[in-house]
Amino acid sequence: MNAAPTDLARLIDHTLLKPDAAREDIERVCAEAREHGFFSVCVNPIWTRTVAEALAGSEVATCTVVGFPLGATPTRVKAFEAEGALEDGANEIDMVIDIAAARRGDRAALVEDIRGVATAVHAHGGLLKVIIETALLEDEAKVLACEAAQEAGADFVKTSTGFNGGGATVADVELMRRTVGPDMGVKASGGVRSREDALALVEAGATRLGVSSGIAIVSGGTSSSSY
């Protein structure tokens, strides 16, 4: 593949989810996203309004995580969190699934969890990405989680939070793409540090990349940041 840096930039959710991030760090990633033309800036909910204000007038979207990073909160809480973020200016929500339900093979619980958030997000005109946390699941559970996300009306499935072990792999992205087919989004996140990493994941089927090393990726370098 020979994707141009500008093309790759439009696949990147420029991400800062560290709990100790300060306002100046958030403002910096917003400025970087504007400069390099990234698709969005992805932050914890407390920073949603700050990011939306910093990105106003640009083409860069505001993305917020909910139920993050464990997914172990009730659906109604995830939905409430998502609604608050959307009211604060988010365009996209990345939710963590009920990982325990995926591990025990409980499709109905997964669909209910995801649909509850999807309904809230879509009612506010937002887009929902579903983090299945591939590092904690066997392949059968990964497939189940992707199928549940699709059934529940999510817009994307996403590999990882970056906080619970391994991140995105080519094999996982290929599996997710095969499962959801050609029309649903697949986001690769966690451990994507170089342009080569990014291009391999896009080749495998990723249509969005969640990274904290976006500048290194579009410039052809490598970052030591994990997410």
Image (cartoon, grey):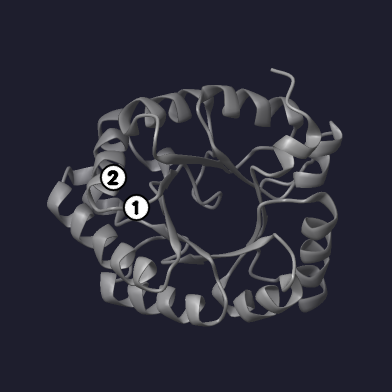
Query: Pointer 2 and pointer 1: residues touching (CB < 8 Å)?
Result: yes
Which residue type carries mark 1? Ala
Q: Where is residue 107 in the image (x, y as percent from the top left)?
A: 16, 47
Q: Which residue is drawn at 17% across and 56% down?
A: 109
Residue bearing the label numbered 2:
150
Q: Residue at x 70, y 71 (%)?
A: 20
Q: Position of residue 183 (x, y in %)?
A: 39, 36
Q: In this view, does 121 lie to the left or right of 29?
A: left
Q: Residue at x 80, y 34 (%)?
A: 5
Depth check: give the residue in front, 196 or 32.
32
Q: In this view, does 24 lie above or below 9?
A: below
Per the model, the C-alpha gap separating discs 2 and 1 is 6 Å
Q: Is residue 167 left or right of residue 141?
A: right
- Label 1 neighbour load within 10 Å: few <14, some 14-19, many 20+: many
Q: Position of residue 226 (x, y in %)?
A: 67, 45
Q: Quadrant of residue 18?
A: bottom right
Q: In this view, does 226 lie to the left or right of 138?
A: right
Residue bearing the label numbered 1:
154
The N terminus sits in image quarter: top right
Depth check: give the residue in front, 76 or 52.
52
